[in-house]
Image (tube, rainbow, N blue to C red):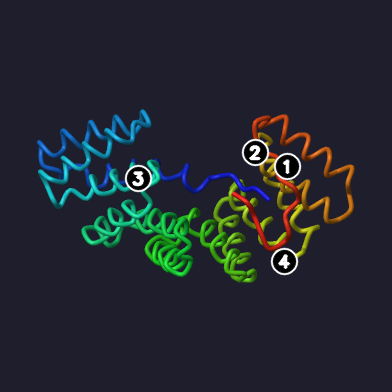
Amino acid sequence: MQKPNMRNRLLLPALMVFLFVYGAYAQTTSADYFNRGQDYYKRQDYSNAVSDFTRAIELDANNANAYFGRGLARYHKGDVDGSIVDFSKLLELSPKFAPGYVNRAVARGDKKDLDGAIADYTKAIELNPALILAYSNRCSARDTKKDYIGAAADCLKALELNPKSVAAYNNLANVRYHGRDFDGAIAAYSKAIEIDPTVAAAYHNRGTAKWYKADYAGAVVDHTKAIEIEPTRPSITPAAPNHIAN
């Protein structure tokens, strides 16, 4: 099974929220490096972004923006451990900033620290009960831990807050799939496709669920559509109900 990498793609908007809240507190010189670091980050030049955010921190060790920006840049460079360090420092400086907990949770999840990730998502929800991404991502983490009841509840809460959330429908479908509720999984994948018909993984996953229902013709149609959307996507055989391949 495949799932789109939606969580990581949502880290940048959290950065922009943070800038509006905290940007005024950076010292002028530190802010210069921070602002250029932002520019590099937006251009996906993560190495130079890390360098500028680091310089901003050297000039102002309390520049929470810079820790947040460097955490994001490190994450996208594949330095997940470094991103966790930076998000943790950010949260020392700004312990009530909910997106910081979400981003650290994403990184912890990548390190297979599911308990730590769930704790961070839970803290983010305590701080901001309307934070849809926290519910959707906690759903995925709980799904991985085979807490299917808790996972489904989280995804349904995310959908209550945003009925158009493709990520929430995709994650809910995964939960149902792992619980061998293939009809429910197909229905949820279909909703995700209805909202965004360009997500290849949703077609692939729905096709796999159909395969387990012995709807081989339907599986071929969905897998063919997934290939049309992403022709370079690696070929993946149908996964067992307790596994999703990223």
Instruction: Kindly report the distance in space between the C-alpha atoms of the residues bearing marks 1 and 3.
Output: 30 Å
Q: Name the foreground residue: 30 vs 1.
A: 1
Give the crowd class for mark 2: few <14, some 14-19, many >=20 residues within 10 Å. Answer: some
Q: Are marks 4 and 2 in contact (CB under 8 Å)?
A: no
Disc 2 marks a residue whose amino acid type is Val
Give residue 176's position: percent from left, percent from top: 71, 61
Mark 4, secondary structure of its residue: loop
Residue that badge 4 annotates: 179
SS at circle 1: helix
Which residue type carries mark 3?
A: Leu
Instruction: Classify mark 3: residues with Cα within 10 Å, few (<14), some (14-19) or many (20+).
Output: many
Position in image of residue 172 (x %, y %): 65, 57
Q: Earlier in the sequence, mark 2 or mark 3?
A: 3
Q: Are marks 1 and 4 in contact (CB under 8 Å)?
A: no
Which circle's residue, 4 or 3, is located before the other in the chain? 3
- Marked residue nearer the N-terminal end (1 or 4): 4
Task: Give the labeled residue for mark 3.
Answer: 72
Q: Nearer the viewer, residue 57 or 127?
A: 57
Is 147 left or right of 38, judged from the image as shown?
Answer: right
Q: CA distance from mark 1 to mark 4?
A: 19 Å
| Circle number at residue 199 | 2
At 54% across and 56% down in the image, what residue appears?
136
Above or below 38: residue 210: below
Sequence-wise, which precedes: disc 4 or disc 2? 4
* Residue at x-position 83% and y-position 56%: 212
Residue tagged 1: 203
| Residue contact at pointers 2 and 1, CB within 8 angstroms | yes
